[in-house]
Image (tube, rainbow, N blue to C red):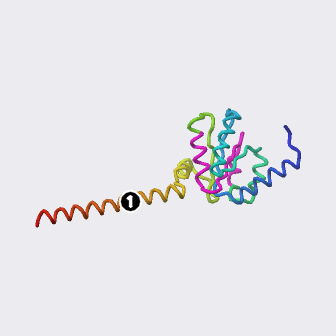
Amino acid sequence: MALNLNKKKTIVSKIHQISNSALSAVIADSQGISVNQINQLRKSGRKLNVKMSIVQNTLLSLAIKNTSFECLKRIIKGSTFIAYSIDHPGSGVRLFKKFEKKNKQFKITGAVFEGKLLSNAEINQLADMPTYEEAISKLLLVLKISAAGKLIYTLSAIKQKKETS
């Protein structure tokens, strides 16, 4: 279905608005992926507050102009599926990585964080970055383990003192 000029302007302004508020973006080639699979991916993305869309490259280039994602222009080609992470910088990349493992035709082609185009290794690091909740739970676990270790050490010292007396 052909888009008229007003619809194109609406798409560009909507994506530009998202680009100004997003923390990171990831793009992928979605050719060969069924509509049902894309819908499932979008459904998962809504739970994580990840904004996704399949956009014509020229419209995407116009939408990301003068944003921190402008460096994506160099690598967009083919069928472009873009996801913007709103709450956590790694949520979009993590979602795409998980989807890529299940669907071999789906390929991540690039990502941007803090205005920098990321390498494959950096994309993996961004995907592995814990969320705030995950980081807090890991910290609490470490504190709990260290407190238990101190308790065991104290009890052991009391036991040794009683045995020597």
Let me know if residue 77 is in the magenta part: yes
What segment is highlighted magenta in the picture? 71-99
Q: Position of residue 97 (x, y in %)?
A: 57, 43
Quarter of the view holding residue 21? bottom right
Q: Which residue is mark 1?
A: 144
From the viewer's perspective, is 13 left or right of 72?
right
Q: Position of residue 27 (x, y in %)?
A: 66, 46
From the viewer's perspective, is 151 left or right of 92?
left
Type of the residue with mark 1 = Lys
From the viewer's perspective, is 113 left or right of 70?
left
Q: Nearer the viewer, residue 111 or 42?
A: 42
For label 1, the crowd category at 10 Å Cα-Cα, with few meaning under 14, some 14 to 19 and many 20 or more, is few
The number of numbered discs placed on residues in the rendered structure image is 1
Q: Position of residue 10 (x, y in %)?
A: 83, 51
In the rendered image, the quadrant that contains the N terminus is: top right
Label 1 residue SS: helix
In the rendered image, the quadrant that contains the C terminus is: bottom left
Establish if 140 lies above or below 48: below
Q: Position of residue 53 (x, y in %)?
A: 72, 45
- Residue plotted at (52% across, 50% down): 128
Q: Nearer the viewer, residue 53 or 152?
A: 152
- Residue plotted at (67% across, 43% down): 43
- Residue plotted at (86% across, 39% down): 2
